[in-house]
Amino acid sequence: MSDSNENAASPAAAIGGRRGLMLILSSPSGAGKSTLARLLLEQNPDIYLSVSVTTRGRRPSEVEGVHYHFLTRERFERLRDAGDLLEWAEVHGNFYGTPREPVEAALSAGRDVLFDIDYQGAEQLYEKMRQDIVGVFILPPSAAELKTRLERRAEDASGVIEKRLRNARTEIAHWRDYNYVLVNADLNSTFANLRNILLAERLRRERQPGLEPVIERLDHELAELAE
C-alpha cells in the first residue's frame, strides 16, 4: 500500500493550527474495522488511538494497553459512575468504554483520535461531540463472508460466533447514523477509501482555522496590485 499521501494527510500540512477530529470506525464483529484501524495507524503515526476499557476477557492475540485496557466489572463501574468515560456500552454481555481525559487532551493538542467502537458508543459520542466526529461504518460484502472471517480468526467459540452473527443485524441497522459507509470486499480498496475520507475531512474549511489570516493577506496584496 502506497504512503504517497501521508504528508498531504498530515495535520502539519493544513494551514494553521486546528483542533483534532474524532474518526469513528464501527462495524459488526468480523467486518474488518480493527484491521483497517491498524493499517491507518501504521501509515499515520500522528493519529492517537483511543484505547477502550473493557470487562471482556483478553484474547490470545491481544495485548493489554494496546488493544484494550482489561478491567474488572467493579473497576469499570467506578470509572463510569465517576463520569470518567466519554461513552460506554454493553456488547455481547461485556462492558466497553472510552476514557475521557486522554481523548480531550489529544484533540486540544491538534491530534486526530481514532475510535474502534460499536454503534452504541458512537451514538453517545455524537450526542456530546458531534462537530468533532467523522463516522465511518464498515460493512461485510455478504453474511457468508462475515461468518467465514469470524471462523478464520479462530478466537471465539462457536456459540460466541453465532451470537455475533445474530447481533450483526442490529448493528448494521444503524448504518444511516454514520457520515460514510464502506463495503469491505477488498481490504486494499477499502483502506484507500478510508484514507481519502480522512484527508478530505482534515481539509474541510471549518477545520482550518488558519485560513482567515491567509485570505486577509491575499485580499490586501491584491488590493495593492490593483492600485
Image (tube, rainbow, N blue to C red):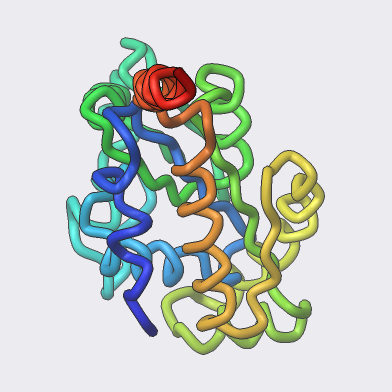
Image quadrant in which the C terminus is located: top left
The vertical placement of 183 against 7, above or below, is below
* Residue 133 in sight in this render: yes
Q: Where is residue 104? Give x, y as percent.
A: 29, 23
What residue do we see at 51% from left, 73% from top? 192
Q: Residue at 30% of width from left, 19% of height from top?
A: 78
Left or right of 2, for residue 23? right
Q: Is residue 53 visible in this depiction of the protein?
A: no
Residue 68 horizontal/vertical position (percent):
29, 51
In the image, is 85 to the left or to the right of 173? left
Q: Position of residue 181 (x, y in %)?
A: 70, 57
Q: Whole-percent x and y of residue 124?
A: 57, 25
In this rendering, position of residue 61 left or right of residue 96: left
Circle count:
0
Q: Residue furthest top?
A: 82
Q: Residue at x 76, y 45 (%)?
A: 174
Of 51 and 194, the residue lying toward us? 194
> Residue at (27%, 28%) from the top-left corner?
17
Q: Quadrant of residue 7?
A: bottom left
Quarter of the rendering occupied by the N terminus: bottom left
